[in-house]
Image: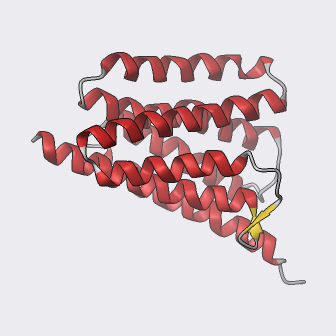
Amino acid sequence: MAPKPWSEWSMALSHMALAVVSLRAAVSTAQASRGAAAGFLLQALAAATMLIRGLGTDEDCLAGAWVATVIGLPLLAFDFHWVNGDRSSANLLLGGGMVLAVAGGHLDSEGRSVAGQAVVLVVAVTILIVAVFTTNTYGMWGGAMLGAAGLLSRLEEDRLLLLPKEDVCRWALAAGSWAYHRALHTQRLQWE
Protein backbone atom coordinates (compact mmCIF):
# COMPACT_ATOMS: atom_id res chain seq x y z
CA MET A 1 0.00 0.00 0.00
CA ALA A 2 1.47 3.33 -1.05
CA PRO A 3 1.69 6.08 1.58
CA LYS A 4 -0.81 8.93 1.32
CA PRO A 5 0.48 12.17 -0.14
CA TRP A 6 0.83 15.12 2.23
CA SER A 7 -2.17 16.91 0.70
CA GLU A 8 -4.49 14.03 1.65
CA TRP A 9 -3.15 13.98 5.21
CA SER A 10 -3.52 17.74 5.44
CA MET A 11 -7.12 17.57 4.23
CA ALA A 12 -7.95 14.72 6.62
CA LEU A 13 -6.40 16.53 9.60
CA SER A 14 -8.22 19.79 8.86
CA HIS A 15 -11.58 17.98 8.55
CA MET A 16 -10.87 16.05 11.74
CA ALA A 17 -9.92 19.21 13.66
CA LEU A 18 -13.08 21.01 12.54
CA ALA A 19 -15.24 17.99 13.40
CA VAL A 20 -13.72 17.49 16.87
CA VAL A 21 -13.76 21.17 17.83
CA SER A 22 -17.33 21.62 16.59
CA LEU A 23 -18.59 18.44 18.27
CA ARG A 24 -16.97 19.44 21.57
CA ALA A 25 -18.55 22.88 21.29
CA ALA A 26 -21.96 21.36 20.48
CA VAL A 27 -21.88 19.06 23.50
CA SER A 28 -20.80 21.75 25.93
CA THR A 29 -23.25 24.40 24.71
CA ALA A 30 -26.28 22.09 24.39
CA GLN A 31 -27.51 22.84 27.90
CA ALA A 32 -27.25 26.62 27.61
CA SER A 33 -28.18 27.16 23.97
CA ARG A 34 -29.81 24.62 21.73
CA GLY A 35 -29.52 26.88 18.65
CA ALA A 36 -25.77 27.35 18.94
CA ALA A 37 -25.35 23.66 19.74
CA ALA A 38 -27.28 22.78 16.57
CA GLY A 39 -25.03 25.11 14.56
CA PHE A 40 -21.90 23.51 15.96
CA LEU A 41 -23.36 20.04 15.39
CA LEU A 42 -24.10 20.81 11.73
CA GLN A 43 -20.47 21.89 11.27
CA ALA A 44 -19.21 18.74 12.99
CA LEU A 45 -21.44 16.45 10.94
CA ALA A 46 -20.45 18.08 7.65
CA ALA A 47 -16.73 17.80 8.44
CA ALA A 48 -17.09 14.21 9.68
CA THR A 49 -19.08 13.23 6.60
CA MET A 50 -16.38 14.62 4.32
CA LEU A 51 -13.78 12.71 6.31
CA ILE A 52 -15.67 9.41 6.33
CA ARG A 53 -16.67 9.59 2.67
CA GLY A 54 -13.03 9.69 1.65
CA LEU A 55 -12.80 13.44 1.19
CA GLY A 56 -14.61 13.17 -2.09
CA THR A 57 -16.71 15.75 -3.82
CA ASP A 58 -19.91 13.78 -4.22
CA GLU A 59 -23.20 15.65 -4.07
CA ASP A 60 -24.19 14.46 -0.58
CA CYS A 61 -20.98 15.75 1.00
CA LEU A 62 -21.20 19.07 -0.80
CA ALA A 63 -24.85 19.45 0.21
CA GLY A 64 -23.91 18.80 3.84
CA ALA A 65 -21.19 21.43 3.72
CA TRP A 66 -23.68 23.86 2.12
CA VAL A 67 -26.24 23.30 4.91
CA ALA A 68 -23.56 23.62 7.60
CA THR A 69 -22.60 26.99 6.13
CA VAL A 70 -25.97 28.59 5.38
CA ILE A 71 -27.88 27.23 8.40
CA GLY A 72 -25.20 26.25 10.94
CA LEU A 73 -23.31 29.53 11.00
CA PRO A 74 -26.47 31.69 11.25
CA LEU A 75 -27.57 29.49 14.17
CA LEU A 76 -24.33 30.41 15.95
CA ALA A 77 -24.86 34.09 15.25
CA PHE A 78 -28.53 33.82 16.26
CA ASP A 79 -27.69 32.96 19.85
CA PHE A 80 -24.97 35.58 20.07
CA HIS A 81 -27.40 38.31 18.96
CA TRP A 82 -30.41 36.98 20.87
CA VAL A 83 -28.69 36.98 24.25
CA ASN A 84 -27.61 40.59 23.69
CA GLY A 85 -31.18 41.67 22.91
CA ASP A 86 -30.71 42.16 19.16
CA ARG A 87 -33.60 39.94 18.20
CA SER A 88 -34.22 41.51 14.78
CA SER A 89 -30.66 40.79 13.60
CA ALA A 90 -30.86 37.29 15.06
CA ASN A 91 -34.08 36.53 13.19
CA LEU A 92 -32.84 38.17 9.99
CA LEU A 93 -29.64 36.09 9.93
CA LEU A 94 -31.46 32.84 10.62
CA GLY A 95 -34.26 33.60 8.17
CA GLY A 96 -31.77 34.54 5.46
CA GLY A 97 -29.92 31.28 6.02
CA MET A 98 -33.14 29.29 5.71
CA VAL A 99 -34.06 31.06 2.46
CA LEU A 100 -30.58 30.38 1.05
CA ALA A 101 -30.79 26.71 2.06
CA VAL A 102 -34.05 26.34 0.15
CA ALA A 103 -32.82 28.35 -2.84
CA GLY A 104 -29.52 26.44 -3.02
CA GLY A 105 -30.97 23.91 -5.44
CA HIS A 106 -31.59 26.69 -7.96
CA LEU A 107 -28.03 28.02 -7.83
CA ASP A 108 -25.09 26.69 -9.78
CA SER A 109 -21.87 25.74 -7.99
CA GLU A 110 -20.39 29.24 -8.42
CA GLY A 111 -23.56 30.84 -7.06
CA ARG A 112 -23.55 28.53 -4.04
CA SER A 113 -19.88 29.30 -3.45
CA VAL A 114 -20.45 33.06 -3.52
CA ALA A 115 -23.56 32.81 -1.33
CA GLY A 116 -21.73 30.60 1.18
CA GLN A 117 -18.82 33.01 1.38
CA ALA A 118 -21.25 35.90 1.84
CA VAL A 119 -22.93 34.07 4.73
CA VAL A 120 -19.56 33.43 6.37
CA LEU A 121 -18.57 37.08 6.10
CA VAL A 122 -21.94 38.45 7.26
CA VAL A 123 -21.97 36.14 10.28
CA ALA A 124 -18.35 37.02 11.10
CA VAL A 125 -18.94 40.77 10.85
CA THR A 126 -22.15 40.77 12.88
CA ILE A 127 -20.64 38.68 15.68
CA LEU A 128 -17.50 40.83 15.59
CA ILE A 129 -19.63 43.97 16.01
CA VAL A 130 -21.54 42.51 18.95
CA ALA A 131 -18.30 41.26 20.51
CA VAL A 132 -16.68 44.68 20.24
CA PHE A 133 -19.64 46.42 21.89
CA THR A 134 -19.85 43.82 24.66
CA THR A 135 -16.04 43.61 25.01
CA ASN A 136 -16.10 39.85 24.48
CA THR A 137 -12.50 39.06 23.50
CA TYR A 138 -13.25 35.50 22.42
CA GLY A 139 -16.05 36.79 20.20
CA MET A 140 -13.64 39.23 18.59
CA TRP A 141 -11.16 36.42 17.89
CA GLY A 142 -13.92 34.19 16.58
CA GLY A 143 -15.19 36.90 14.26
CA ALA A 144 -11.67 37.59 13.03
CA MET A 145 -10.94 33.90 12.38
CA LEU A 146 -14.26 33.28 10.63
CA GLY A 147 -13.77 36.44 8.57
CA ALA A 148 -10.27 35.28 7.69
CA ALA A 149 -11.66 31.93 6.53
CA GLY A 150 -14.20 33.71 4.34
CA LEU A 151 -11.66 36.09 2.85
CA LEU A 152 -9.01 33.42 2.29
CA SER A 153 -11.50 31.29 0.39
CA ARG A 154 -11.89 34.13 -2.13
CA LEU A 155 -8.18 34.22 -2.98
CA GLU A 156 -7.06 32.93 -6.36
CA GLU A 157 -4.10 31.04 -4.89
CA ASP A 158 -4.33 27.27 -4.58
CA ARG A 159 -1.88 27.07 -1.65
CA LEU A 160 -1.44 29.22 1.45
CA LEU A 161 1.29 28.69 4.02
CA LEU A 162 2.43 25.56 2.11
CA LEU A 163 -1.03 23.98 2.57
CA PRO A 164 -4.00 23.76 0.21
CA LYS A 165 -6.19 26.85 0.55
CA GLU A 166 -9.27 24.84 1.63
CA ASP A 167 -7.31 23.26 4.48
CA VAL A 168 -6.15 26.65 5.76
CA CYS A 169 -9.75 27.86 5.65
CA ARG A 170 -10.91 24.81 7.65
CA TRP A 171 -8.17 25.38 10.25
CA ALA A 172 -9.30 29.03 10.54
CA LEU A 173 -12.92 27.88 10.84
CA ALA A 174 -11.96 25.39 13.57
CA ALA A 175 -10.11 28.13 15.49
CA GLY A 176 -13.09 30.44 15.02
CA SER A 177 -15.48 27.76 16.27
CA TRP A 178 -13.37 27.22 19.36
CA ALA A 179 -13.30 30.98 20.00
CA TYR A 180 -17.09 31.25 19.48
CA HIS A 181 -17.61 28.42 21.92
CA ARG A 182 -15.56 30.32 24.50
CA ALA A 183 -17.35 33.57 23.58
CA LEU A 184 -20.76 32.01 24.19
CA HIS A 185 -19.55 30.67 27.54
CA THR A 186 -18.18 34.09 28.50
CA GLN A 187 -21.39 35.75 27.36
CA ARG A 188 -23.52 33.40 29.45
CA LEU A 189 -21.35 34.09 32.52
CA GLN A 190 -21.82 37.84 32.06
CA TRP A 191 -25.60 37.50 31.93
CA GLU A 192 -25.88 35.26 35.01
- Quarter of the picture containing the N terminus is bottom right
Can residue 15 be seen?
Answer: yes
Q: Is residue 132 above or below residue 126?
A: below
Is 144 on the left or on the right of 190, as rendered? right
Compared across the picture, whether 95 is left or right of 70 comes to left
Left or right: 138 with respect to 177? left
| Residue at the image position 62 percent from the left and 54 percent from the top | 48
Quarter of image, res 112 = top right
Residue 105: x and y, percent? 76, 21
Q: Is residue 93 above or below residue 150?
A: above
Q: Residue at x 63, y 45 (%)?
A: 150
Left or right: 1 with respect to 149? right
Instruction: Give how far across and how far down residue 23 sits, in percent.
Output: 46, 54
Q: Quadrant of residue 18?
A: bottom right
Q: How is the image coloured?
A: secondary structure
Identify the residue at image location x=38%, y=49%.
Answer: 140
Picture quarter containing residue 166? bottom right
Q: Nearer the viewer, residue 151 or 3?
A: 151
Q: Position of residue 31 (x, y in %)?
A: 25, 43
Quarter of the picture containing the C terminus is top left
Is there any visible trace of residue 52 in the rendered image?
Answer: no
